Image: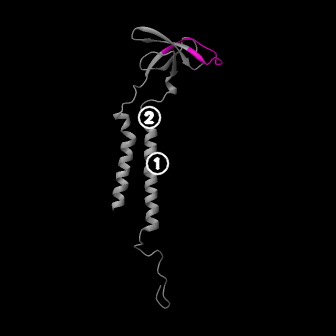
Amino acid sequence: MFILLVVGLVGIGVAVALLVPTRVLGAPEPPRRVTATVVESGSCGQGTDTVEWDADGQKKQAKLDGCGHRKGETVEVVVPADGNGDMVQSAASVPAGLPVSGRLTALLLCLAALAGGFYAFLFRYAPLRAPAVLPTPRPGSPS
């Protein structure tokens, strides 16, 4: 019973260690998504288009990390939180939200490893409470 308590406390400790830092330490402000218009289409050899969007009443331009858009086409882009920068990315290529999925994957991997180790421990060291095989019939007894 003590081992289950230890495994549970280790699991809770790992969960706290993986999930709390984003809330306590403060994650950087997520980038803003805005709708921009392509003002200059670059060739795919060059690799960038120029886009323009409205930022608080001002028109701002930046290079879009992508190519092949038509002039006048509207695209959703991700702008840095401060609004400055000469390069923006397409909103479809930037993950949305906090990077919790990687932490959750690590948490589940740790818990699975602990559970597997505990299961192997039970197989190796736990006393058998029931006979491992059926009793062999005695000669002359009804089967």
Of residue 114 and residue 132, the one placed in the foreground of this image is 114
Asked if residue 41 lies in the magenta stretch, the reply is: yes
Report the magenta residues as a range.
36-49
Percent of width and height locating residue 65: 56, 20
Q: Quadrant of the N terminus?
A: bottom left
Relative side of 56 to 71, left or right: left
Q: Which class describes the residues within 10 Å of circle 1: few (<14), some (14-19), or many (20+)?
A: few
Q: Identify residue type, mark 2.
A: Pro
Residue 119 drawn above or below residue 130:
above
The disc, 2 or 1, on the residue closer to the chain's N-terminal end is: 2
In this rendering, the answer to whether 99 lies above or below 106 is: above
Residue lying furthest front = 25
> Where, by quadrant of the figure, is residue 22 drawn?
top left
Q: Dot 2 corresponds to which residue?
A: 99
Q: How many marks?
A: 2
Task: Looking at this view, name the residue that lies furthest to the top.
Answer: 58
Q: Residue at x 46, y 17 (%)?
A: 35
Picture disc at residue 33: none
Which residue is pictured at 38% across the width and 55% down the height? 7
What colouring does the structure picture have? one colour
